[in-house]
Amino acid sequence: MRPARREYIPAMVEIRVLGEADAEEFWAVRLEGLEREPWAFGTTPEEHRRTPAAAIAPSLRAGHPDVFVVGAFIDGRLRGVAGFSREARIKTRHRGRIWGVYVAADARGRGIGRRLVQAVIDRARTLPDIRILSLCVSMDQEPARRLYRSLGFVLCGVEQEAIRIGDRAVDEEHLMLRV
């Protein structure tokens, strides 16, 4: 007997840059990601809890092109995020980093991760002198690795034992995309 297929119900998905008013929801979604996917992030849930949402709000202030977070809202509820930060130093300002990509378990399988990362790429391309986007992905995160490669990211290195929890460690791939 085949398991019942999950019925796909179309939902309204809005992809947009987060602002200060989104801080509480961003904080909660980020915590969910850290708890559900501990091997995907270098931050622990405990570390995240030490920074209240109110402290994050100023960093989400709209209008700062060099640091932003894109969110996916399904029927008005934040269900996915992807961050961007540009290198600050003069010699490295041609590089930007994508970080913190997470799609809630109940929203996966709908192309939301692809839309989030593509939105970051598209916005980063509008910044003057951006040439390279980079990101890191845990070797345990095969769907994410496939997504990034399908968007044109290429391997530029592997960091051994990049993340360690207890006695277990996982390597991370360092990927880059020329824009």
Image: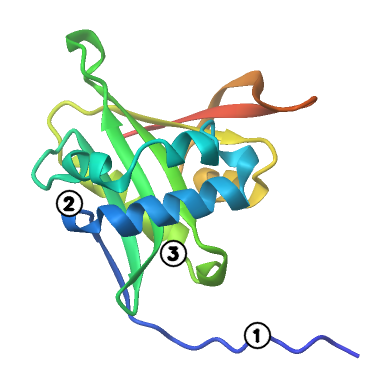
Residue beneath disc 1: 6
The three-letter amino acid code for the residue at tag 1 is: Arg
Residue beneath disc 3: 112
Q: Is residue 112 toward the left or the right of residue 36 in the image? A: left
Q: Quadrant of the N terminus?
A: bottom right
Residue 82 appears at what percent x and percent y? Answer: 37, 48
Residue 16 appears at what percent x and percent y? Answer: 23, 60
Residue beneath disc 2: 20
Q: How many marks?
A: 3
Is 113 drawn above or below residue 59 in the view shown?
Answer: below
Of circles 2 and 3, which is in front?
A: 2
Towards the viewer: 36 or 63: 36
Residue 44 appears at what percent x and percent y? Answer: 55, 36
Q: Secondary structure at mark 1?
A: loop
Badges 1 and 2: C-beta atoms under 8 Å apart? no
Among the 4 quarters of the image, the one containing residue 29: bottom left
